[in-house]
């Protein structure tokens, strides 16, 4: 599953996991696989001034595999509804060999995901109902109520037009979780649906997303810019990423 993340223009310090503070407009997450620091995810939320898609989520994912630095940037234009339904996304990044990929755009309308490449080629795929694009769920989770049972149903789209239907997010309840060696009480949500293993999210009382676990071994932890980059030693490299805004 590809990830998405943005360029950073100045970052407010992350709240401590158990604190109930007003969430910042942007946030950083350290990413690890089986406990090994591998990358980071950075998300920034802003307003577009466009009535049809008033919310813009700029997201950048940076990771190192086999000694190679990879990155992907997604700018998602969303409705201001319960699941930040995607209207349009623009995707840039690297391919599996670390080379620069051409920019692509995906528009969502009339139950379809329509992808347009930089060369103007188009392809469409069925995408029914409310559409959540990739890791915008990290923002959606922060808005959901602490109420037992299913609280959201949607279609998830990844990698342009990889459509996964019948996704649900349910509130599981409050539990004690170990984060950074500290045990804290957090609210747990779980996402299930076509094409994924169950994904768990933990949110504090202030609706700040603190921890995410995917596939049982891929973990995201709320962090700061400095901690996220330094955790796997790419503080210098990320400053030189091609296509940086």
Image (tube, rainbow, N blue to C red):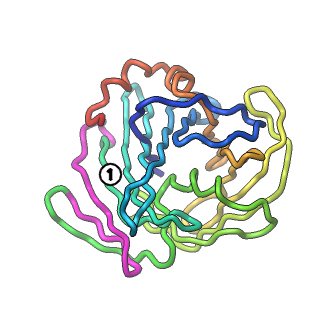
Percent coordinates x, y for residue 81 in the rendering = 54, 67
In front: 53, or 196? 53
Q: Residue furthest bottom?
A: 110
In the image, is 84 to the left or to the right of 9? right
Tag 1, which secondary structure? strand
Snapshot quadrant of residue 60: top left
In the picture, the quarter occupied by the C terminus is top left
Above or below, comparing residue 223 to residue 6 in the picture:
above
Determine whether, in the image, residue 215 is placed left or right of residue 237: right
- Examine the structure image and report whether residue 203 is included in the region drawn in magenta: no
Between 24 and 4, the one lying in front of the other is: 24
Picture layout, residue 158 above or below residue 213: below
Would residue 194 appear left or right of 238 to someone viewing this image? Answer: right
Q: What segment carries the magenta color?
A: 96-117
Q: Residues within 10 Å of mark 1 (few under 14, many from 20)?
A: many
Majority secondary structure of the magenta segment? strand
Q: In screen coordinates, is 237 left or right of 155?
A: left
Look at 50% across and 68% down and name the residue there: 164
Q: Residue at x 76, y 36 (%)?
A: 19
Residue lying at 26% horizontally and 56% vertically, measured from the top left = 104
Residue closer to the observer: 187 or 15: 15
- Is residue 99 highlighted in magenta? yes
Residue picked out by circle 1 = 91
Q: x, y percentage for residue 169?
A: 67, 64
On the image, the x and y values in percent for residue 158 come to: 44, 59
x then y, percent, for residue 9: 41, 31
Of 78 and 237, the residue lying toward us: 78
- Image quadrant of residue 241? top left
């Amino acid at each position: 599953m590809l990830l998405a993340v943005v360029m950073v223009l100045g970052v407010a310090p992350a709240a401590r996991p158990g604190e109930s503070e007003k969430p910042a407009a942007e946030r950083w997450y350290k990413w690890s696989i089986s406990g090994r620091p591998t990358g980071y995810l950075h998300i920034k939320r802003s307003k577009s001034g466009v009535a049809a898609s008033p919310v813009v989520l700029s997201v950048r994912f940076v990771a190192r595999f086999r000694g190679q630095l990879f990155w992907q940037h997604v700018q998602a234009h969303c409705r201001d509804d319960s699941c930040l339904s995607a209207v349009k996304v623009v995707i840039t990044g690297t391919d599996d060999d670390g080379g620069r990929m051409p920019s692509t755009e995906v528009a969502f309308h009339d139950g379809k995901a329509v992808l347009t490449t930089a060369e103007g080629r188009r392809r469409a795929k069925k995408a029914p109902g409310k559409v959540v694009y990739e890791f915008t769920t990290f923002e959606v989770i922060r808005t959901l109520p602490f109420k037992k049972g299913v609280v959201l149903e949607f279609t998830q789209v990844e990698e342009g037009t990889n459509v996964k239907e019948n996704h649900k997010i349910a509130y599981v309840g409050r539990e004690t979780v170990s984060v950074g060696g500290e045990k804290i009480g957090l609210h747990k949500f779980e996402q299930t649906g076509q094409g994924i293993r169950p994904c768990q999210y933990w949110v504090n009382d202030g609706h700040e997303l603190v921890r995410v676990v995917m596939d049982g071994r891929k973990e995201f932890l709320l962090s700061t810019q400095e901690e996220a980059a330094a955790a796997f030693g790419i503080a210098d490299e990320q400053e030189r990423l091609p296509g940086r805004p």
